[in-house]
Image: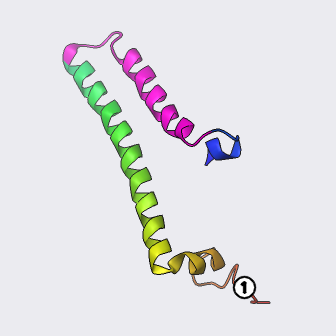
Amino acid sequence: MLAERLGLPAWHAGLATVLQCRKLLGCVGADLAPEERRRARAAVARLYVRRHVRTAMGRGRKLAAMATGRAERRLCRTRGDRGYGRRGSR
């Protein structure tokens, strides 16, 4: 979303995660014992995977909503069932 607003190609957003994780991995090796280093590297790997899984799940939900026609209803309601944002609710 941020890359889109800045007028950058979509792959730039994914590259930011890769660069952040590489930088973190570079910092991890500094003054840690081998066991601590392994745990820190595992934490960085979990961060990387979690971000990609979250992105994939969001894209999957979006595609499912588009396929079932729920995408239009989603645009009409912005705050649950309280009536905010409904078309013609005035």
Q: Amino acid at mark 1?
A: Arg
Give the x, y percent position of residue 25. 37, 21
Quadrant of the drawing holding the C terminus: bottom right
The magenta segment: 9-34
Q: Is residue 21 above or below residue 81?
A: above
Specify the quadrant of the image occupied by residue 77.
bottom right
Q: Is residue 18 above or below residue 76?
A: above
Magenta run includes residue 84? no
Name the residue rendered at 33%, 9% in the picture. 31
Q: How is the protein colored in the picture?
A: rainbow
Magenta run includes residue 28? yes
Give the x, y percent position of residue 22. 41, 23
Q: Answer left or right for 40 relative to 82.
A: left
Q: Helix, strand or loop at disc 1?
A: loop
Q: Which residue is mark 1?
A: 87
User: Which of these two is toward me, 74 or 78?
Assistant: 74
Name the residue rendered at 76%, 89% in the picture. 88
Specify the quadrant of the image occupied by residue 26.
top left
